[in-house]
Image (cartoon, helix red, strand yellow):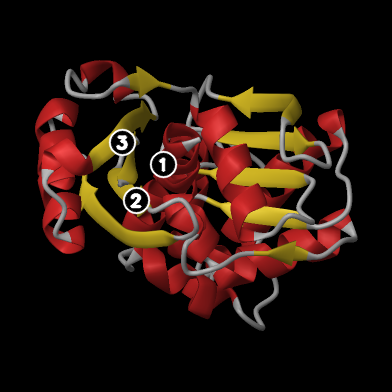
Amino acid sequence: MISIGIDVGSVAAKAAAYDGEKIIATAILPTGWSPKAVGEQLLAEILHKTRTPKEKVKSIVGTGYGRVSLSFIDKNITEITCHGKGAYYLDPKIRTVIDIGGQDSKVIKLDEGGQVVDFLMNDKCAAGTGRFLQVMANALAVDVGDLSRLATGAEPANISSMCTVFAESEVVSLVAEGSSKETIASGLLHSVCNKTYSLASKIGVEDKVFFSGGVSRNQKLGELLSHKLGTEVISSKESQYLGAIGAAIIGYR
């Protein structure tokens, strides 16, 4: 028997399968226009990857903003709970999770058993999220995945606004003034770091921090957060699947 977790985010949808001991398969797809359709596609892909007939699935748990669209799930759980459970599975020493996704960011505090004891969420605007970085990368005419490489070793340009619209105007102005893409990219990542630090400071950071969400693939941002927070910030190749992993584990137990 296995359990399946499906996390439908604003940009990407992820799935994970758990056999009671370990995560045995993951999958990811762009969310697209239909959370329901992508959820069904992910379910089919996970069943195929694990060679599991649907009747051998113990439970299917949905999470993320699109979870309400998944008619086939047995239960839906908030992404806060699922990210906490997923981080604790990957490293039981984790007490703080910083998740930066496509449209929101959140800081989650865990107890020694991996239960959520507090959290803060920025979901009022795109400031400091993956969407913010995507818009800024477009303004620089670079791929969002190149921002980390460009920013490494570069002095940060001063970008004062965290509003996506105003910050984009600042980037366009900096380009027109002759600032390099490297310094602008560095300035952007410092801005996101400062915004995340401000959110984390309100809740307090304890011990090791796990950096999750699509933005966690930005290595330079992880380094900036570690320096700013004064503690170890870790990530992994499974960081983007954290919500789906947590959902699968909750479903099994």
183 shown above or below 110: below
Residue type at numbered disc 3: Lys
Depth order, front residue of 208/30: 208
Mark sitting on residue 66: none
Whether residues under marks 1 and 2 lie with C-beta atoms below 8 angstroms apart, the answer is yes
The first of marks 3 and 1 along the sequence is 3
Classify residue 49 by image quadrant: bottom left
Q: Which residue is mark 1?
A: 248
| Whether label 3 touches label 1, CB < 8 Å | no
User: Where does residue 37 sit, x and y in percent of width and height?
Assistant: 9, 32
Query: Residue type at mark 2?
Result: Ala
Q: Determine the residue positioned at 60% across, 41% down.
A: 85
Q: Residue furthest bottom?
A: 153
Q: Residue 195, percent across and down?
A: 69, 41
Answer with mark 1 or mark 2, whichever residue precedes in sequence. 2
- What residue do we see at 33% from left, 68% from top? 142
Where is residue 138 shown, x and y percent of the image?
32, 56
Residue position marked by numbered label 3 in the rendering: 58
Q: Quadrant of residue 56?
A: top left
Mark 3 is surrounded, within 10 Å at the Cα level, by few (under 14), some (14 to 19) or many (20 or more) other residues, namely some
Q: Which residue is mark 2?
A: 16
Q: Disc 3 and disc 2: Cα gap in Å?
A: 13 Å
